[in-house]
């Protein structure tokens, strides 16, 4: 409807209809309508627009309500009990009032001030009362205030989120296909099951500081392996359209949702190895990762909506197209927060803030490799052997020869491995240790040259403890004094500890001895005879058996035993020689 002309407005103002007595206003309005060829309703609307009216008086009972606070709370909670997990209200306020009144939980009544009549409050009156109390379900279900979160620089924080592509699936035969709604929806689950293995998932990595977007597609489902692969593709340098994409590097922090794949062992293992902290937001708080949730919507509306007109035959082609679009989007679209393109803001990153990722093969190995145990050896120095190479572990705190360390690959320094340790809170710590190289003669490159230099390995915990114990044993404060005391044969602990003192001073009970029996010999052992020299045999015959060994008896002894005299036969020999000597005496007397 065209607005009133200035002439029409002037005629209405001149008529001064508002000041006319009661009963004459309608006739005046009709006359103006006939004069201007307008309807009566049009004149009334124009009159309302150009007339200044005093504000309506506020009702004396405005803002007042008779619903008690306790009943308002019960009504509100009962309506909220009917809200499903998706936030949909399945119990109306009218239904809640009816159920609660029937159960006697609320009365929700009002009393007429003039007649005293008690009448049930209407649904609208209850609704107004709930709003006045701040208890209306519409008010309660509003989102709570969100805390603002900032990042310090590009790659200080990235947010990662996976979402299934609802527009397309990737067939091995026909390539990328549109999921027609008439064929793929909840009432035809078999069609969805048929293409389950061909469903396409997208992983979005968004830099929180600049808003730059990276997308990587995978087949199958949301899993730890797919998350690791998507992250590796983001972190490592890549070429898009013949030019290097600047949006890459290892972030310092990653923010993810509570999905099992995001908090699983593979991704967390990779994150620890590369020095990235992974934080998962609380369940049900998806807006905590809003920096990636909104780009999911942008990506679906801008990129995936255009794929129906693009010939995509494989997953590789799909990812190539996604990389091309992401690079264009980041370089051309300005972010509403900082007013610059995402690429321009990302390029403000300082060199020390963009940590370049190692090769993809090493990153995949770090995600799955379990640290291996290696024993610390004493030569060359405190060292370990890992995959055919020797590494110097003398800088590892608490290293001890003979003990074991856990070792894995180092993602940052070539010629190094990482020693895995844990702090008091159980957090994994990585310490890079260098490889020990050997020259053509097999000597370590860090070995001291004889006659030219002197290098002594630093004391390990074991050597430090050994020196401490020696000082305590000798009662000295220095290693030199302790060595001198040991050389002087000083007893440990000042000789105050006597190992046999307890045995010497013990008062033991006198045992009652038991009679024993001889052990019967089951076998007879023949010992070889011991041969005595003739001189020794003659001495023993005289001393032990009383034989007066004359030269004649000595000659007889030698004749009887030319090779030596058997020790066991000395008694028999003594008797024989005594008889022979007696015969000689008798014979001499005749």
Image (tube, grey):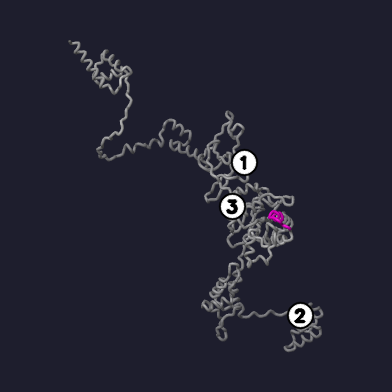
Provide residue 560's location: percent of width, then percent of height: 29, 17
Q: Earlier in the sequence, mark 1 or mark 2?
A: 2
Specify which label sits upstream in the sequence, 2 or 3. Answer: 2
Q: Nearer the viewer, mark 1 or mark 2?
A: 1
State the count of labels: 3
Q: Is 382 above or below relative to 119?
A: above
Q: Quadrant of residue 327?
A: bottom right
Can residue 444 be seen in this snapshot? yes
CA distance separating discs 2 and 3 = 73 Å
Q: Which residue is mark 3?
A: 266
**Counting residues from the N terminus, which is met first, the one under dot 3 or under dot 1?**
3
What is the CA distance from the residue labelled 1 to the residue labelled 2?
88 Å
Cα–Cα gap, marks 3 and 1: 24 Å
Q: Residues within 10 Å of mark 1 (few under 14, many from 20)?
A: some
Residue that mark 2 sits on: 46
Mark linked to residue 168: none
Q: Which residues are magenta?
A: 311-321
- Image quarter where the N terminus lies is bottom right
Percent x, y for residue 501?
Answer: 34, 37
**SS at mark 3 in the image:** helix
Q: Is residue 390 magenta?
A: no
Give residue 310's position: percent from left, percent from top.
74, 59
Using the image, tell me which numbered label, if any, was put on residue 415.
1
Residue at (56, 77) in percent of width and height? 97
């Amino acid at each position: 409807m065209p607005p009133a002309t200035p002439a029409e407005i002037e005629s209405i103002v001149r008529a001064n209809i508002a000041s006319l007595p009661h009963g004459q206003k309608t006739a005046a309005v009709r006359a103006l309508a006939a004069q201007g060829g307008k309807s009566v309703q049009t004149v009334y609307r124009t009159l309302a627009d150009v007339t200044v009216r005093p504000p309506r008086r506020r009702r004396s009972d405005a803002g007042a309500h008779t619903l008690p606070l306790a009943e308002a709370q019960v009504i509100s909670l009962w309506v909220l009990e009917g809200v499903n997990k998706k936030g949909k209200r399945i119990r109306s306020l009218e239904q809640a009032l009816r159920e609660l009144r029937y159960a006697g939980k609320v009365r929700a009544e009002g009393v007429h001030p003039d007649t005293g009549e008690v009448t049930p409050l209407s649904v609208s009156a209850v609704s107004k009362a709930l709003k006045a109390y701040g208890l209306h379900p519409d008010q309660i279900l509003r989102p709570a205030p969100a805390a603002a979160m900032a990042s310090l620089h590009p790659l200080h924080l990235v947010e990662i989120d996976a979402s299934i592509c609802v527009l397309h699936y990737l067939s091995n035969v026909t390539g990328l296909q549109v999921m027609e709604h008439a064929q793929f929806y909840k009432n035809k689950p078999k069609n969805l099951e048929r293409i389950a293995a061909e469903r396409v998932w997208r992983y979005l990595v968004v830099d929180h500081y600049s808003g730059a977007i990276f997308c990587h597609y995978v087949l199958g489902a949301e899993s730890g392996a797919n998350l690791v692969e998507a992250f590796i593709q983001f972190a490592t340098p890549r070429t898009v359209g013949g030019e290097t994409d600047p949006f890459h590097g290892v972030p310092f922090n990653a923010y993810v949702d509570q999905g099992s794949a995001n908090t699983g062992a593979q991704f967390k293992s990779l994150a620890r190895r590369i020095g990235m902290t992974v934080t998962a937001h609380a369940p049900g708080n998806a807006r905590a990762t809003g920096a990636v949730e909104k780009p999911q919507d942008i990506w679906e509306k801008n990129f995936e909506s255009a794929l129906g007109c693009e010939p995509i035959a494989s997953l590789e082609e799909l990812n190539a197209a996604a990389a091309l679009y992401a690079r264009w989007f980041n370089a051309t679209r300005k972010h509403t927060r900082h007013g610059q393109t995402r690429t321009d803001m990302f390029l403000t990153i300082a060199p020390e803030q963009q940590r370049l990722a190692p090769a993809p093969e090493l990153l995949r190995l770090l995600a799955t490799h379990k640290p291996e145990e290696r024993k610390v050896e004493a030569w060359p120095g405190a060292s370990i052997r890992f995959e055919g190479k020797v590494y110097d572990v003398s800088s590892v705190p608490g290293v001890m020869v003979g003990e074991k360390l856990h070792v894995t690959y180092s993602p940052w320094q070539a010629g190094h491995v990482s020693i895995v340790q844990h702090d008091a809170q159980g957090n994994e710590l990585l310490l890079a240790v260098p490889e020990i190289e050997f020259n053509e003669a097999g000597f370590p490159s860090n070995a001291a040259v004889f006659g030219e230099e002197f290098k002594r390995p630093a004391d390990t915990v074991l050597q430090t403890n050994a020196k401490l114990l020696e000082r305590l044993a000798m009662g000295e404060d220095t290693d030199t004094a302790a060595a001198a005391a040991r050389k002087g044969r000083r007893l440990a602990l000042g000789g105050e500890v006597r190992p046999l003192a307890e045995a010497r001073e013990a008062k033991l009970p006198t045992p009652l001895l038991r009679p024993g029996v001889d052990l019967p010999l089951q076998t007879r052992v023949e010992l070889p005879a011991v041969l005595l020299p003739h001189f020794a045999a003659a001495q023993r015959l005289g001393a032990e058996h009383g034989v007066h060994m004359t030269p004649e008896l000595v000659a007889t002894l030698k004749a009887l035993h030319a090779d030596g005299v058997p020790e066991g036969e000395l008694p028999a020999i003594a008797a024989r020689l005594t008889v022979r000597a007696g015969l000689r005496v008798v014979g001499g007397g005749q």
